Image (cartoon, helix red, strand yellow):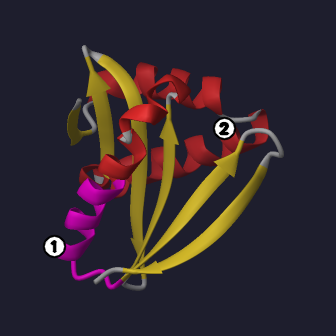
Amino acid sequence: MNLRSFQLSDCEKVTNLLKEVLSDTCFKKTIKVFSKQLSYDSELVIIAENDSEVAGVIIGSIENKQGLFILVEDPSYTHNEVGKKMVKKLRERFVQRKVKEMNVTMHDIQIEESHQIDSVCS
């Protein structure tokens, strides 16, 4: 599993993953955040790649010294702790930017809700 920054060539694969995993409502919201973040700071968009396939994406952003992120992974890779690895990598980038707190947005596919979880970085 390779973790790396987003590249323009990833756009179609990431979009397809988001469409596949998220509900229509969540997809529309997430694609807007994704597009906006790419224009601000693409280094906070991290791709998990396995054999040239996108296994997951984490879209980070910073607002008022607070790190926010949306994590989406291919369900077939959940046993590989892809999400955990992407969070760790993004956390390193947040620490470099002096972020003290992270907020996670998780989309529950079954009930189509967003949940906020606050977590302090140490």
| Picture layout, residue 121 above or below residue 12 | below
The Cα–Cα distance between marks 1 and 2, rounded to whole angstroms, is 29 Å
Tell me what residue is drawn at x 22 percent, y 39 percent: 3
Residue type, numbered disc 2:
Phe
Q: Badges 1 and 2: C-beta atoms under 8 Å apart?
A: no
| Picture layout, residue 22 above or below residue 61 | above
Q: Quadrant of the N terminus?
A: top left
- Residue 27's disc is 2
Q: Is residue 50 magenta?
A: no
Q: Quadrant of the C terminus?
A: bottom left
The segment highlighted magenta reads 87-100
Residue 114 percent coordinates (x, y): 72, 58
Q: Viewer-proximal residue, 52 or 41?
A: 52
Tell me what residue is drawn at x 24 percent, y 52 percent: 43
- Residue 96's disc is 1
Q: Decide if residue 65 is on the left or right side of residue 21.
A: left
Q: Decide if residue 79 is on the left or right side of residue 52.
A: right
Magenta stretch: dominant SS? helix
Residue 108 percent coordinates (x, y): 71, 47
Circle 2 SS class:
helix
| Picture layout, residue 111 above or below residue 103 | above
